[in-house]
Amino acid sequence: MDAISFTLSDFHVLKPAVVLCLVGCGILLTDAFLVRRIGQRWLNAVTALVGEAVVAAVLLQYLPDVRSGGSLTGLGGSIVVDGFGVFFNVIFMLAAVLAVILSARYMEAEGEQRGEYYALILFAQAGMSIMATGHDLVVLFVALETMALSFYVMVGFLRDSKRSNEAAMKYLILGAFSSGLLAYGFSVLYGISGSTSLAAIGEAIAGRPALDWIMILALITTSVGLFFKIAAAPFHMWAPDVYEGAPTPTTAYVSVASKAASFALMIRLFVTAYGSVAEAWVPLLAIVAIATMTIGNLAAVTQSNLKRLLAYSSVAHAGYMLLGLVAFSETGLRGIAIYLLAYVFMNYGAFALIAALRRDGEAAEELDDLNGLFGRAPGYTILMAIFMLSLTGIPPLAGFYGKYYIFLALLGEGYYILAVFAALYVAVSAYYYFRVIRACWLGEAAERPASLDMNLGTRTALVASGVLTVLIGVLPQRFIDLAGESVLAALR
Amino acid sequence: MSLDSVLFYVLAALVLGSAIMTITRRNVVHAAVWLISALVGVAGLFLSRGAEFLAGVQVIVYIGGIMVLFLFVIMLVPVHDESTQRRFSNQKWPATVAAVALFLWVAFIAVNGVGMLDHPGMAEPLGPGSLSENSEAVGLVLFSQYLLPFELASILLLVAIIGAIVMSKTRNRETES
């Protein structure tokens, strides 16, 4: 404790975050001294992709060690790389790669093509990487803040857009407020246990006499802090404004990666630290999940802006995922993991198409802008339909399996009423997802219709998302096994 | 009365007096300066309890960082308009109730002793003397047990700096280069 020691094995567990931070700093430097002179700012995106390739190599390097329930521990147990951490790191990596690819075109079109943006994508990912592997409250909190701060800046990156600035401001203030609550809850946990390690906190809580007011205080403050981050009702009000105002690739990144990282932290905290007081938080989570699905699905029905529609749909999805935690079984958590993996592709696909949609160089984001798109770009419209069907949860597409396992877990644990509610809301969600499809096929095209502004990157992202959405749906076994293996590591 | 208690009452008077001056000044710059004085008093209180690390942090973070930020904000808003406006909003009465309730709560704890907050399983409070050489202890823990959050915080600050520059940089300079 009193000697400074940092060994090679400590470095080994930190590699993804270290690589991301170094490449992020590298982008800042090459942008300032090299890329700016050449005038080819998209080169920053290439640098970021090279960084992601290195991260992928590091994650592959972890594989033999985390297979069959193994784990790597570093820094006195505050970082544990296990199957769960690697699985979520893969999700973050996929999300970041898609964000970089989409941003290269979008930011160019918006006139904000700058190196800092790509550096922030990587810094956010470094924070998320540690959120998924951290086992210490202080580490988790600083990692969460690193992610959140990067997102605040990325959301406000379109400096000339009033809505982008407004979104960043709202996100910053509500985010800071929720972080404050979370920090307060963490301090209570430290007061209860005298330790910042999740395992020690779990033992201290299990060894306590009963569920008293101080435990309830800790539970409520940490839960509310995390509800903000995953945009669960009634703490979802930032989501529509932030999703609408942010640059579209950032919206996709925030909705997918930030949700996945917050769920990773939440699962770790609730399973490892709160596992013994499950009877206290299961009702709380069940109520919040129902409220989240209700508000998300009902509000999405009336939206006319595509990004707002997807924002409310993302709120609703957070509700379904929470139900997986309510079931608190291996099947339920496996459902969350497979849900999040599928969500990367179907959500990114939908946002990729919206990001490409332009009229006279201006971003077109209204539902009406999709009118008659099938006549102009049939291939991409079919992809959009696939993403919408997958978001609804129609088999055999990726989105089906997340919902399927969560419903299965709810029925297995005897939560029949919750399962009925969730199934009813799937029917509601079908209505607004089919509105999007209907606009594409049956909508009357405007005089100057919006067209798709595609480049190689956007095409690749769209097609790859589409292929994977179908692939996970048609050949699910491999992915379900991976999700199951990762969840078992978290439950151990 | 020991020297320690004399010191305590002097510092407490300084903190309370400055705090009252802070909320009663019409000129916001004066209020800010009085707030600095109150914060210095709190730093003195920490120091008299042997918590020299907290005292240092109090001076560096609150007086050095946050107060400078306050003064910047004050310089950026038109001060002379503010000094003629009505100073208390409609929330005066709820605020009074909240303040009185907080005062009664703190007084209640002070009268009954801090022991009433004890609950089973709570970590042991630190006794007097256990805080000696706390800067050294903080440093050791920071660079051993909490090395990772410490390093991660540097990335956090880097992101904050990038954010500030991105948000404030004007477009002209951008197109020049």
Image (cartoon, coloured by chain):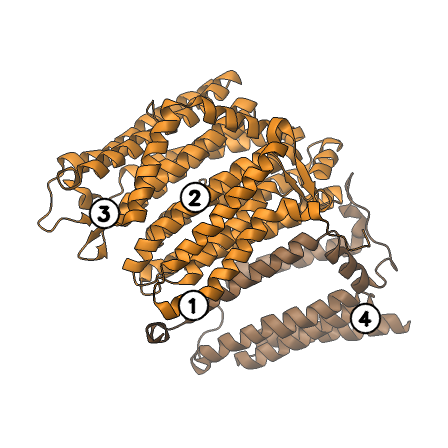
Chain colours: A orange, B brown
Q: Mark 3 — residue?
A: A366
Question: Distance from label 4 to label 2 (Cα)?
Answer: 56 Å
Q: Which mark is residue B8?
A: 4
* Res. A34 mark: 1
* Kind of residue indicated by mark 1: Leu
Q: Are marks 4 and 2 in contact (CB under 8 Å)?
A: no
Q: Of the residues tagged 3 and 4, which is closer to the observer? A: 3
Q: CA distance from mark 3 to mark 4?
A: 65 Å
- Badges 2 and 1, same chain: yes
Q: Is residue A147 left or right of residue B170?
A: right
Q: Earlier in the sequence, mark 2 or mark 1?
A: 1
Identify residue type, mark 4: Phe
| Residue A319 visible in this rendered orientation of the protein | no
1 and 4 marks in contact (CB < 8 Å): no
Labels 3 and 4 positioned on one and the same chain: no
Q: Chain of mark 1?
A: A
Circles 3, 2 touching at the beta carbon (< 8 Å): no
Q: Secondary structure at mark 3?
A: loop
Label 2 vs label 1, nearer the camera: 1
Q: Mark 2 sits on what residue?
A: A95
Tell me, yes or no, whether dots 4 and 2 are on the same chain: no
Tell me the kind of residue under disc 3.
Glu
Q: Label 2 marks which chain's residue?
A: A
Q: Position of residue A329 (x, y in %)?
A: 56, 23
Q: Viewed as shown, does residue B114 lie left or right of A481? A: right
Q: Position of residue A74 (x, y in %)?
A: 69, 44
